[in-house]
Amino acid sequence: MKRRKFLKTSIGVTASVGLGLLAGSLSSASKTLPSKHLIMPPLLDTLGTGRINLNAQFGKTRFLGTGVSLTKGFNQGYLGPTIRMRNGILEENVSNSLAEDITVHYHGLLVPGRSDGGPQSVVTPGSIRKSELNIDQEPSTLWYHSHIHRCTGNQVYFGLAGAIQVTDGLDEQRGLPSQYGIDDLTMIIQDRRFDNLGRIVYSPKMSDVDNGFHGERIIVNGQFDTVAVVPKGIVRLRLINASNARIYTLGFNDGRPLHLIGTDGGLLDKPIFLKYLRLIPGERAEVLVDFSTGSLSTLISKRGNLMQIQKFAVDDSIPVKIKKVPDFFNSQPFPLPATITKTRRFSLTMGGGSAGQPSADDKVVAKESGYICGGRSAGDMATDFGINGRSFDMDRVDFEVALGSVERWIITGAGAVYHPFHVHGVHFRVLSEGGGLGRRQENVGWKDTVLASGETEILIHFTKPAGYESPFMYHCHILEHEDAGMMGQFVVI
Ligand code: C2O
Ligand code: CU
Ligand code: CU
């Protein structure tokens, strides 16, 4: 009962209401816990309504300190609701109360180009985009974000992103936790830079464009330094790396393992035991964590400087539903056709491509605050990043792919930077990463984002069409690289 109430009440309301409810469900044992609890984004459950309503709007958000950051979000001030959906037709309404163009790109959703929300599908200020989505894929954790060329880095940084859950309603039968915000937690992980008042700053210098813009502190679901309160049993974490550029190597400070159960495209057939999980920008992972022992534990990232990601505290009064990690999930991994029709090579290039100066109309709107795109984006700093020596051009379709075919893509990274390579409208299998034979555990299952370090080889199945008016993108998911032109587009016909 408690759960239903929580879900119902949290639809479309602000985050602070959710906090009250979560805190209210805690026992007296929680008095010893720090008071700031991690709260979930509100749930936008389309299962009953068949409808997605998103409005991009301005917000004022306090992250830490006394400063109030100017932010952007969907239906709230920072980030957007978690959209729960299942296969079938969804009505989509996207409106825009901001002063800048936006799109809503569904990262990982297998929909045709016209529904994908790429840079062509602009929603201008004051307008509404109405369309239809045909959801047709395995249960998975995806995300959505704005995708305006040259502004994606800025727009995601200031909050235009959110989580998606595709569900088939069978998780209970699989023995998987599925109570939103109780034993099934969504964690949107982002790193941010703050000024001395605690306001988030986005002002990439040329070195930030080269390396990607990194922040020194972590926020989860837009919240800084919180405690996630969990039952004393198995908890599912849906991890989304929505950072502009940072790669995480996630693990628990007390060594408790992560049981990887799903990657970008959906569930694995059985869990994989991991001590550390690497998560690259754009990538998602679903893991199970056993909290039946111990009471406090911290998720950290040990890549480069040690960073605290999320503290966890057990509350024994929360009923435990799932007590053991299932052995397998009855997932139905769809097979990949055996015939490979084509091999393509992609070399990611940093500079030295078709360099050009940003045109005057790229520098629009207010200059002073940086939070409106056009103030200072990576696209203003550099436009000569590219793929195969060519910088992104919205008017140029780079190649055509045959609908239904399977292609082998070989991606070669540039420079000392690792590039998270992402393809719209498809799922793929990773054959090798960094030229190595050994497949990383994170690369099993279906993927839409993979690390191009050295030479990386993937097999892509193209199952959805994309015409010349709304092609699919392929790009580096370091958003400063993408904004600077490390992106291309293709049609599937
Ligand atoms: Cu996360 Cu082109 O997308
Ligand atoms: Cu995408
Ligand atoms: Cu890159």
Image: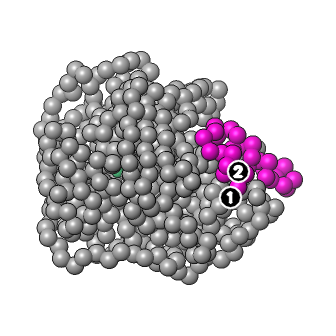
Prevailing secondary structure class for the magenta stretch in the rendered image: helix
Of helix, strand and loop, which one carries label 1?
loop
Of helix, strand and loop, which one carries label 2?
helix
Tell me: 184 left or right of 233: left
**What percent of the width, then of the height, locates residue 267?**
47, 70
Residue sitting nearer the eye, 486 or 398: 398
User: Which mark is drawn over residue 182?
Assistant: 1
Q: Is mark 2 within 8 Å of ligand 1?
A: no
Q: Which residues are magenta?
A: 4-33
**Counting residues from the N terminus, which is met first, the one under dot 1 or under dot 2?**
2
User: Which mark is drawn over residue 58?
Assistant: none
Category of crowding for the residue at label 1, using alpha-carbon neighbours closer than 10 angstroms: few (below 14), some (14–19), many (at least 20): many
Instruction: Say what amino acid the circle numbered 2 marks.
Output: Phe
Tell me: 39 left or right of 138: right
Residue sitting nearer the eye, 294 or 304: 294
Dividing the picture into quarters, in which one does residue 372 lie? top left
Tell me whether the residue at label 1 lies in contact with that at label 2, contact meaning CB atoms closer than 8 angstroms. yes
Residue drawn where x is 19% and y is 57% of the image: 492
Residue sitting nearer the eye, 31 or 246: 31
**What percent of the width, then of the height, locates residue 210?**
30, 41
User: Which mark is drawn over residue 6?
Assistant: 2
Report the Cα–Cα distance between label 1 and label 2.
10 Å
